[in-house]
Amino acid sequence: MSIIIGPDGSLVNTSNVGSQFIPNITPNIGALANVASLGGSSIPKGVENEDGTFTIPNIEMRVRGTGLEPGQLQNMYGISGDQGVAMFEFLSPVQTGTTTFDPEDDDLMSDKNLDKINEGFDGAEPPTDGAQKQDFARMAQKGVGVIGQNIGMSMGNAFTGMNAPGGSGFTGNDVVAAGFNSINPFGSPTTAEQAGINYMDNIDPMMAGATGGVDAPTGYGELFQSRSFGERMMPGLKTAGFVAGGNFVGQVIAGADPMDAAEDAAKAGVAYFIGNAIAGPTGGKVAAWLSNLI
């Protein structure tokens, strides 16, 4: 037997399908179709209405008192005859009202429910000022900020190459050219930018057009110290500044709130410096990009 209870705790429906002792009567409320109430009358069966709905009784189980003194029932229960109580119904079902329900409400594919779904979409327009639109706009602003920070990163590395120890021969025009060159996603770094990357990675900048040698940290530990708080710390901070500035300008151009843009730009700059200290310019680039996902 299965029982369906409504949200208010009342009986909505029961089923005796599969029982060999209780007939499957439609409409009915299954095994509770003929239970007796306190007054001795039977609770009526469910009724099918002309509109296809069903009206069924609400049944509540109530506790019955024995009418005996405390402790007296235990001496009499299970004893037949006038001196005993062979059996006692401690809980009794009582009808408290009726409930009308429509079986189609539970059928999501019924014509009634499908019509409701169609009505909900008729003439519907996407929200114009909703949170979803704001989220998409913020994502677009962050995307432009990433483009800006990449331009700033290339300019920062070129600036590092221009100021690398030993003299590089690069000028401010080379720094600007590196920024424009970064707009092409398939382009290679300019000579000035590559010189700055090589310096931060402890590769002789002579390979990228510089004219002098640089200090040569031995091992990753010394290189990490150099990029964190040594000779390469200031170039790393300056490039991080270029990254933050590019991110900020890009987002503001895309329409972002200056405070939101400044917060994201600061995160990108800090992330670049940390990533650069750990894994050089490539690590800084990855860390700055990941900061935009937070």
Image: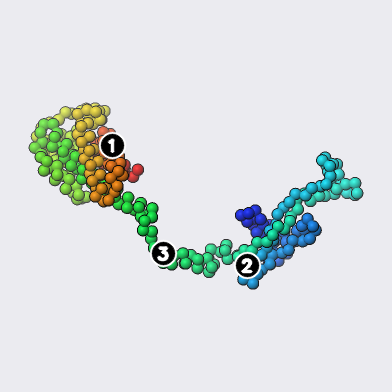
Q: Quadrant of the N terminus?
A: bottom right
**Residue 260's x, y, as percent?**
31, 44
Identified by mark 1, the residue type is Val
C-alpha separation, residue under disc 1 versus residue under disc 3: 45 Å
Image height check: is 89 above or below 212? below
Q: Secondary structure at mark 3?
A: loop
Q: Earlier in the sequence, mark 1 or mark 3?
A: 3
Q: Residue at x 41, y 67 (%)?
A: 123
Q: Which mark is residue 270?
A: 1
Identified by mark 2, the residue type is Thr
Q: Residue at x 82, y 50 (%)?
A: 87
Find the residue positioned furthest to the bottom.
50
C-alpha separation, residue under disc 1 versus residue under disc 2: 67 Å
Q: Which mark is residue 53?
A: 2
**Residue 101's x, y, as percent?**
62, 63
Q: Secondary structure at mark 2?
A: loop
**Residue 156's x, y, as percent?**
19, 39
**Residue 200's x, y, as percent?**
20, 34
Relative placement, left or right, of 40 versus 104 is right
Which mark is nearer the camera, 3 or 2? 3
Identified by mark 3, the residue type is Ala
Q: Which mark is residue 124?
A: 3
C-alpha separation, residue under disc 3 versus residue under disc 2: 31 Å
Q: Secondary structure at mark 1?
A: helix
Q: Dot 3 surroundings within 10 Å: few (below 14), some, or many (20 or more)?
A: few
